[in-house]
Structure formats: C-alpha cells, structure tokens
Amino acid sequence: MTIMIIILLIISIALIGISYFQRDNVKELEQELDHLQLSAMQEIYKLKKKMRIVEEELLQNDVPLKEQTNSYEEQENKSNTSRVLAKYRQGMSLEAIALSEASSVEEIRLIVEQNERVLT
C-alpha cells in the first residue's frame, strides 16, 4: 500500500513537471489575437487618415467643379435660348419649336417673352 502511494506521488510529481514544460497554447492564442488586434487598429487608423486627406482634397476641388458646372449650364441655356429665338424669328410656331427642342410650349413661351427686347 505504501508502495502504491509512493508510485502515485512520483507519477503526480512527474505530471506536474511535464505540465510546466509544455507550451501554453492559450497564451500563444492570446498573443496572436493581441497582435492581430493591434495590426487591425493600425490599418483602420491609416485608412481613416487617408480618407480624411481625400475628403479634404475633394472639398478643395469641389468649389471649382460647381463653378464649372454652373458655367456649362449657363452656356447651354444661352445656346438653347439663341436657338429658340432664331427659330421664332424664322416664323416657326411655339408648338413646332417646343417639339424640335424637346421642351414644353410654356418653356418656349417664357423664353420668347423674356427676350422680347432682343427680338425687336
């Protein structure tokens, strides 16, 4: 009986010793997770920084773009107005001008009324 207790005691000491020398998988997983977390946070920070820079560039370039769009629209409106007035001077009816310009009769009438001074 005492021999059994001694054998069990030796086995338990051996198992405790072996457990200390074994690699701890949980610690390795925790370290790997921490590393992944840090690298993900760094990537997010870099992406946010890049987005901020791009947004600033877009905001700086946005004002001239609106001005360009407005000037293009103004030129388009002027050319439409001049075409409508030229057709009106040639004697076309408002309905015919509306059909050819793909506009409503009211829009054509408005253009003609606004530019009556040019016509006379």
Image: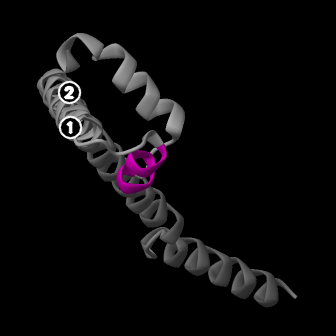
Tell me which residue sits at (28%, 38%) in the image: 84
Question: Would you place residue 40 above or below residue 52 in this image?
Answer: below
Left or right? Give the position of 69 relative to 22.
Answer: left
Q: Quadrant of residue 73?
A: top left
Image location of residue 20, percent across then percent down: 48, 68
Magenta: main secondary structure equals helix
CA gap, disc 2 and disc 1: 5 Å
Instruction: Please rate how many residues cluster around mark 2, counting C-alpha atoms within 10 Å: few if below 14, some from 14 to 19, many from 20.
Output: few
Which sits in the foreground, 29 or 119? 119
Left or right? Give the position of 16 relative to 115.
Answer: right
Q: Quadrant of the N terminus?
A: bottom right
Which residue in the protein does label 1 denote?
76
Tell me which residue sits at (47%, 57%) in the image: 30
Boundaries of the magenta span: 95-101
Residue 101 is tagged as none
Which sits in the foreground, 45 or 96? 96
Question: Would you place residue 119 above or below residue 108 in this image?
Answer: above
Image location of residue 51, percent across then percent down: 25, 38
Element under label 1? helix
Query: Looking at the image, do the residues carrying marks 2 and 1 touch, with CB atoms under 8 Å apart?
Result: yes
Q: Quadrant of the C terminus?
A: top left
Element under label 2? helix
Which residue in the protein does label 2 denote?
74
- Asked whether residue 52 is drawn in magenta, I would say no
Image location of residue 18, percent across then percent down: 50, 78
- The amino acid sitting under disc 1 is Glu
Which sits in the foreground, 62 or 52? 62
Q: Quadrant of residue 99?
A: bottom left
Q: Quadrant of residue 13?
A: bottom right
Instruction: Please rate how many residues cluster around mark 1, counting C-alpha atoms within 10 Å: few if below 14, some from 14 to 19, many from 20.
Output: few
Tell me which residue sits at (21%, 20%) in the image: 119
- The amino acid sitting under disc 2 is Glu
